[in-house]
Image: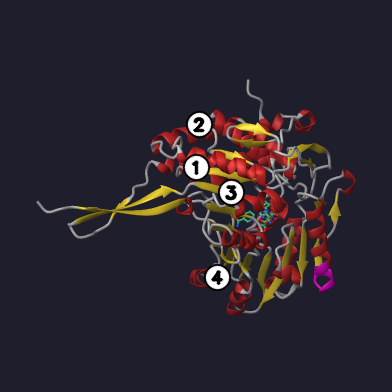
Amino acid sequence: MATSSTSIDWRARAASARFDGRAFIGGERRAARDGQTFDKRSPIDGRALGPVARGQAADIDAAVAAARAAFDDGRWAKRAPAQRKRTLLAFADRILAAKDELALLETLDMGKPIQHALAVDGPSAARCIAWYAEAVDKIYDEIAPTAPSALALIQREPMGVIGAIVPWNYPMIMAAWKLGPALAAGNSVVLKPSEKSPYTALRLAELALEAGLPPGVFNVVPGYGHEAGEALALHSDVDAIGFTGSTRVGRKMLEYASRSNLKRVYNELGGKSAFVVFPDFKDLERCAKTLAGSMFFNQGESCNAPSRLLVHASIADDFARRVAAEASKYRPADPLDAKTTMGALVDEGQLGTVLGYIDAGREEGATVLAGGTQARADSGGYYVEPTVFDGVRNDMKIAREEIFGPVVSVIRFDNEAEAIRLANDSTYGLQASVWSSQIDRAHRVARALRAGTVHVNQYDEDDLTVPFGGYKQSGNGRDKSLHAFDKYTELKTTWLRVDAQ
Ligand code: NAD
């Protein structure tokens, strides 16, 4: 009989879990060429999880060569889309079948609550792979409306070797957002997971091979950004980089492309999303709950976390109090406890960054309404209380920079024009939301907000059918939806002459 996930003793499983940090190249596990490893510790309690291969340029060369050979001989790229679909659906099934194991690896690796890793991360990654699998044999190419003397075919072709470089906050989902469209379109992939969360990416590659993906089509090289990541982004036999991470490193991706082969670069970067609440919105309780849920889910380590709360001055005191009350319901606790809703920050560095921003907020004169301190310090892990700052000005550091932790800033406005100006006064433009019960206002403000996604009177909707990505320094290109195929395919025109009889 199958064991219910909630009845599993996750601590016992964690104690006996095995971790294989070797790279996955050409369909097999390999140590780094020079044998180097780095230590991976769990942010939950600092326990050592096991050594991870420290990939360098030589390992990236081997992975890119394997990917290129697989692409050139057509073992995957030249399969009919319906065949690729079957293999990728089998891959998605294997992810689901391994969801307990993958969830445990994800939680131990980056500190999120096990219940979220189980319910969200594995299933979402599987759904993403399956969605692109299902899509790929239903997309038609085009014939241009040319003169009758010619036939012009406009076709999408796989690009070749895709380098995917991803962060640690949703390791499996971020990988799947690249793998789904890139593999379905027929490309080969070299994935560089974050050094802070390498294990699930490596398991995904094994599961893909078991599902029938030919060796060499999907390779994973763990390692540091400035070593394996840089080598991959600089590699002249990589045709495109799908990058998700910080704006700081996204800038480097463009440099690497210009210094090497002008590979395409698709950047999905940081955010400082505005959540704009007007006094006419009728259900402030739901609004406050939604803000807290979206802000503190995943310990605030979400690119689209609504970290700037813009609220009309007439309701600001009341609304800020409601948000602080909601925040206090998110208590950092042991991520391996199935009831926990808020886990550990990814590492000591991230803990220091978040606490540093909290200090900066206090120094600049903002008031802490909730949280503001480290939690569970005696656990050996890295926890911070959900934190609400009131009295924030949009020019303060905590309002301008992405904190990537559980810290929200309450900023007041007096009228609609000021709300729009403040919301758009950011170098980022990933997401935004407007809360108003007046339909004209809701539409007007939604139109004026400069962000890749705007939510109206909610912040929870998400689906693979819609594109995800940002305006301004939140990036270019879009993950998810059919638009993601644009990133991993080339558009080819073939002219054929048609002679009159
Ligand atoms: P990061 O930029 O530090 O690292 C991301 C990846 O890049 C990692 O794999 C890292 O090893 C690699 N890297 C680092 N330096 C590199 C270099 N010099 N050359 C090549 N690769 C390098 O980001 P992070 O801390 O892992 O993730 C958090 C960031 O990701 C936040 O800014 C967050 O907003 C962003 N993010 C964006 C989205 C989105 O879809 N827009 C989604 C999730 C996370």
> Does the rendering let one see residue 265?
yes
Give the secondary structure at mark 3: strand
Where residue 195 sits in the image (x, y, percent)? 72, 46
CA distance separating discs 4 and 3: 30 Å
Q: CA distance from mark 1 to mark 3?
A: 12 Å
- Some atom of ligand 1 lies within 8 Å of the CB belonging to the residue at label 2: no
The amino acid on which the numbered mark 2 sits, given as a three-letter code, is: Ala
Nearer to me, 183 or 325: 183
Residue 388 included in the magenta stretch of the image: no
Residue 164: numbered disc: 3
**Marks 2 and 1: which is nearer the front?**
1
Contact between labelled residues 1 and 2, with CB atoms less than 8 Å apart: no
**Circle nearer the N terminus (1, 3):** 3
Residue 127, percent from left and from top? 53, 41
Q: Which mark is residue 90?
A: 2
Say the numbered circle drawn on residue 449. Answer: 4
Residue 318 in sight? no
Q: Which corner quadrant of the image does residue 291 belong to?
A: bottom right
| Rendered residue at 60%/66% (across/down) | 473
Disc number placed over residue 183 in the picture, else none: 1
Q: Earlier in the sequence, mark 2 or mark 1?
A: 2
Q: Earlier in the sequence, mark 4 or mark 3?
A: 3
| Residue type marked 4 | Leu
Please tell me whether residue 366 belongs to the stretch shown in magenta: yes
Which of the four quarters of the rendered structure image does ligand 1 lie in? bottom right
Bounds of the magenta segment: 360-367
Identify the amino acid type marked 1: Leu
What's the residue type where badge 3 is placed? Ala
- Between residue 124 and residue 501, name the one nearer to us: 501
**Cα gap from disc 2 to disc 3, whole angstroms:** 22 Å
Q: Is residue 431 above or below residue 80?
A: below
